[in-house]
Image (cartoon, helix red, strand yellow):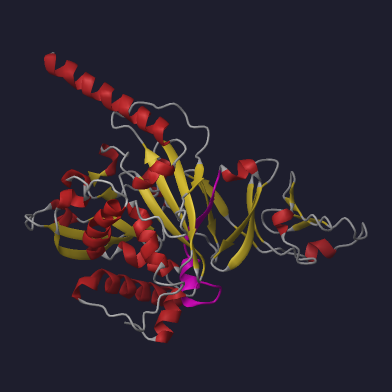
Amino acid sequence: MLTAKQNKTLTQVGPGTPVGELMRRYWHPIAGLSELDGDPVQPVRLLGEDLVLYRDRRGRLGLLAAPCAHRKISLAYGIPEEEGLRCCYHGWLYDAEGRCLEQPAEPPESTFKDRIRQPAYPVQALGGLVWAYLGPPPAPLLPRFDVLVWEDAWRDVGKAVIPCNWLQCMENSVDLTHVDYLHGRYYDYVLERAGKPPRKRDERRFGGKRQVDIGFDLFEFGIKKRRRLEGEGEDYPEWREGSNPVIFPTMTRAGGRGSLQIRVPVDDTQTLTFLYSCYRPDDGQPVPPQASVPVYPVPLMNDRGRFRTDWITGQDIMAWAMQGPIMDRVTEKLGASDRGVIFFRQVLQHQLERVQRGQDPLGVLRDPARNTCIVLKDERGPVESTRYMDNHWQQFSPIYEEAKALMLRHKTRTLAEASVAQRI
């Protein structure tokens, strides 16, 4: 357990707080790029700060503090123009660096605008998402993780705001022992209550095998999780090499292949979750181009106002939120099986100390040569050699059936080509 002071330290994300300063050393996704097609000016809240994301009429992105420097009206109602964003109240015009370019009501000879600077932050588009950096310069590189940059692929993004602190979401990712019960016995109970048949063995996580040991190791970008299943020895690849990494501080490879879950701290009691899927056929053949990456809402509640727990990530989301807006870690009771949670908190504390010493924390990337395509692993080997249609959240995607058909066509072609090769 933690003291009240320690819990406060690890959960607050606003400006000037220890975790807030740590989080500001990383890039965070704040929206889907396609969301700007419907409205090029979007209010955003990140790390306790109210911001406005916009795309100007030349297609350039900008991110400004929401309150206009003049009379504090929100720039979320601003007008995108050729050079930036204009406040709708008195017409002050800001560029992406926060410079005030025009103040229509001031005398023509006035230099007042030259003394105005609106807080502004770097933004980049990658993988269909818009990413923001709120930390000190120079900004690190935005990591080019495999699923974000693979060519000949389709993508979609589920999006939801969870009413709880970010740490609850991330601790769940290193709490490996919950799988057997939350996604096992409880899942079967949910199906029973719905009048549905129990899952077959091959439909269960790890083929229905029980976990008998777990372990955790640091790597360049975060934490490798290791688990050994019943009947598996010390040479079991997932135990020896690790899999499904946690990408510190707010991402994890989870669900199916070609996926990321990204948990973005909105403030102390809200977490914006992106469920990111990449569909890339095994045969390496080109796929039809995707005009834009769709962003779709992930339904959290059922018609009775309770969390939907008939899908795996929905079960996780329920568990995060049901710990309260900020979990009371003062009264929790941790056991030997909670070593992943304890390890994550130790890593987090160590990274806080690095930032306080003026050092880059874990996973911050500054070498362009390292940032071409960073290949991650999942529970079944290198993800570039696998299929991607087993993300349980994909059922909510508007392109799921189309993407599934595309993947099946490629699978059928690959099998046919292999059959021809065997006959030759």
User: Is residue 32 in the magenta section?
Assistant: yes
Q: Is residue 310 left or right of residue 126?
A: left
Q: Is residue 240 left or right of residue 253?
A: left
Q: Quadrant of the N terminus?
A: bottom left
User: Is residue 160 in the magenta section?
Assistant: no
Look at the image and tell me whether residue 152 can be seen.
no
Q: Position of residue 42 (x, y in %)?
A: 64, 52
Look at the image and tell me whether residue 323 can be seen.
yes
Q: Position of residue 78 (x, y in %)?
A: 74, 53
Q: Position of residue 148 (x, y in %)?
A: 42, 44
Magenta stretch: give its range.
13-33
Q: Position of residue 223 (x, y in %)?
A: 29, 62
Is 353 rendered above or below residue 187?
below
Q: Nearer the viewer, residue 81 or 200?
A: 200
Q: Quadrant of residue 284?
A: top left
Is 291 rendered above or below residue 15?
above
At x 60%, y 67%, the residue is 49
At x 33%, y 64%, the residue is 172
Q: Is residue 24 left or right of residue 216?
A: right
